[in-house]
Every structure is written in structure tokens, then in C-alpha cells.
Amino acid sequence: MRPVLEALANTDQLPIKDLYTTVAQIAGLSDEIMQEVIPSGQARFKNRIGWAATHLVRAGAVERPQRGTYSITQRGRDLLAEDKDVTEQRLLEFPEFVEFVERSKPTAHNSTVAVTTDASTVSPEELIEAAAQELRAVVESDLLNTLQTMDAMAFERLVLRVLRGMGYGKDGSLNTTKTSGDDGIDGIISQDPLGLDRIYLQAKRYQPDAHVGGPEMQKFIGALTVQQGDRGIFITSSTFTSKAREFSETARTRIELIDGQRLAKLMIDNQVGVQPAFTTTVYKIDGDFFEDL
């Protein structure tokens, strides 16, 4: 990770292709090493540089001012000033990276395995699961950044795509309301052909430092009352304040809250805005086959 910071230290920003070249020069990589590939076909050195940059971004030492471009932050310059290797253990001193690692942990039954696990202490299956979880955490974080910067109307359309992918409106319809005069309702899900079973939707695309508060939730509850609706879904790219959650829990109508992190997870679960990168098959001995011989 240190060569990545060194490559960015003397420039405003670098496209990823230039970062590959510069880091390779700083690290003194030979032509032979640069020709090595991983199973997916990508050059090994590019894969390692990409992950180094990703971890530095999660730790706040590097930022991406635009897609595929990197620049160093003051935290990154401070790490360089320490004049020693930049390790994952050092990055764990930053709360942003700790949060990333926590989200990268495998499922509960293997919760002791994290992205920084020593390969000698766990099984290959656990390492595969840990790697898959880390990859997913990176995609979730990238999706969240995308959600918070996209056009508000596009965000509403995206929300409908996610809900449709989850099966809502399958036997009825799922539509946005008019852009103005919607009285706080952004979409309506009709669960049956006649539109008798309805769920009302509110979608708010906010920046990370903005939150859905009590007033917004009260307005949505009021809109549901006007529509005589008993169910609603409030989705935001940001988070809900404790007051907003309190209002939703005490309302007479049932309201499901989906914040940005949960929305990113749902997008992956329902393959909305993402696509498989690569797959691999792991084999084991078929004991029944040999028993029947």
C-alpha cells in the first residue's frame, strides 16, 4: 500500500491505468512478475494494486474524485510521513476501515474469520467465504456511494427496479406518481390486478451527511393517512434519525424503513445494478459414488 501512496503523493490525481504503471516502477516490478495472471485472467500486479487502493480508500487515506481516478488525502500523507510500511494492522486504527472489516466478515457461524485472517489458521473453505464477503462489502460500499450521488428521479426509478426484483407488484403494478403534487407519495405498489391491496412508497436520495428526520417521517405518515393506506415503505440513500424511527414504530400504519446500506444489500441480493464478475467451482469427494461401486 505504501507504493500506492507514494505514486499519488506528487500529483493531484491519477487514473487507475497510470497508477498501475507508476506503482510498478516504484516497486521495481520485473517484466516477468508483471506477466503473471490470477485465475480470472487479470494481471496479478494490477489485482494487488487495485486491492491496495481499495483498502486505502476504505481507511480514508485515498479518495476517488471520479470513477477510476485516485488521489491522496491528508491522512494518506500522514501515513507516508511515518516512513514505514503501511499494513492492514495500521489501517485498523481508523474507524472507517474497522467498519469496512466488520461488514466484510462472513456469516455468523464463521464470524471469527475476517479479511485479515492468517491463512494458516483457518480452512480453505473459510478463506473462500471470507474473500467473498470482502468482495461483497466493497461492492456494497461502491453502490452506496453511487446511490448518494445519482439524480433524485433516477433514484426513484432505481428503487422501483429493486422492489420489482424482490417480487413486489408481480400480480398487480408498480409505478411512480407524478413528479409534482404527489402529496409525499413517490410510488404505489398494487399487489393485485384490481389495485385493492396497495403499498405506498417514499424514496429520498440524500447525501451522506443528511438524514431522514422526524418531520419527513411525519409527512409520509400524513400522506398515508390521506390515502387511507395501512402500509408504506420509506427508502433513503442515507440513514434515519432515531426520531424518524420512533415515529414509524408508533404510527398506526405499518412502515418498513430501508436505509442506504440495506438498499445496497438488496440490490446485490436481487442483482440490480450489479453483474457476476467470475465464478469458480469447488469439488469434494462423492462418497456415495464409491460406496455404490
Image: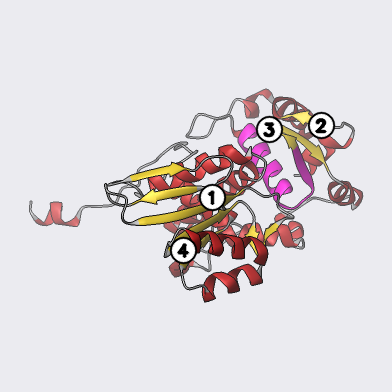
Front residue of 209 and 101 = 209
> Going from the N terminus, do you reach mark 1 or mark 3 first?
3
> Going from the N terminus, do you reach mark 4 or mark 1 first?
4
> Going from the N terminus, do you reach mark 3 or mark 4 first?
3
User: From what the image shows, is residue 18 above or below residue 228?
Assistant: above
Task: For mark 2, give the secondary structure.
Answer: loop
Residue 67's label in the rendered image is 3
Alpha carbon distance from label 1 to label 3: 18 Å
Label 2 CA crowd tier, 10 Å (few <14, some 14–19, many 20+): some
> Going from the N terminus, do you reach mark 2 or mark 4 first?
2
Please state the horizontal and vertical placement of residue 293, each as a whole percent of the image.
7, 51
Q: Label 2 near label 1: C-beta < 8 Å?
A: no
Query: Visible in this render: residue 271?
Result: no
User: From what the image shows, is residue 209 above or below residue 214?
Assistant: above
Name which residue lies at 64% across and 32% down: 46
Please state the horizontal and vertical placement of residue 230, each as a whole percent of the image.
42, 65
